[in-house]
């Protein structure tokens, strides 16, 4: 499986990354980005591990979430 990031998700990731850097410093930013990357890699390896996203059940494709990142 390939994890596809929407433009909105990428933008949100960068906003959060900038906030963490400003408020908590480089180490916290690096830790957050590492966790996000690891979560995406886990989803690529184990795509069925996440819970079904209830707000997207009407879509053709199945969407899953990972709230533990």
Image (cartoon, rainbow, N blue to C red):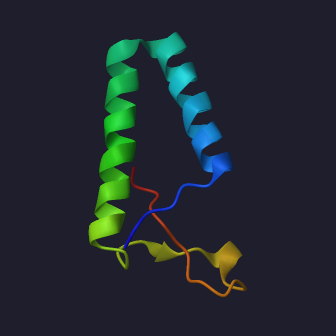
Task: Report x, y in % for residue 58.
Answer: 72, 86
What quarter of the picture does the N terminus occupy?
Answer: bottom left
| Residue occupying the point 50% across, 22% down | 20
Q: How many marks?
A: 0
Quadrant hosting residue 3: bottom left
Q: Percent from the top left, x then y, of residue 40?
A: 38, 56
**Left or right: where 4 falls relative to 47:** right
Residue at the image point whose x is 31% and y is 37% from the top: 34
Residue 51 is left or right of residue 60, and the answer is left
Image position of 40 (left or right of 46): right
In the image, 3 versus 21, the foreground residue is 3
Q: Position of residue 4 (x, y in %)?
A: 51, 61
Q: Nearer the viewer, residue 35 or 67?
A: 35
At x 64%, y 38%, the residue is 11
Residue 7's place in the image compared with 29, above or below, is below
Residue 52 % position (x, y): 52, 78
Instruction: Say left or right for 6 vs 36.
Output: right
In the rendered image, the vertical position of residue 30 relative to residue 13, given as above or below: above
Quarter of the figure with residue 61: bottom right
Tell me the quarter of the picture where residue 36 sits: top left
Q: Is residue 69 above or below residue 32?
A: below
Compared with 13, 20 (above or below) is: above
- Give the residue drawn at x 34%, y 25%: 30
């Amino acid at each position: 499986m390939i994890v596809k990031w929407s433009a909105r998700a990428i933008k949100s990731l960068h906003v959060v990354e900038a906030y963490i850097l400003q408020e908590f410093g480089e180490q916290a930013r690096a830790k957050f980005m590492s966790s996000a990357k690891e979560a995406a890699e886990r989803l690529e390896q184990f795509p069925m591990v996440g819970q079904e996203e209830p707000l997207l059940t009407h879509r053709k494709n199945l969407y899953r979430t990972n709230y533990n990142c």
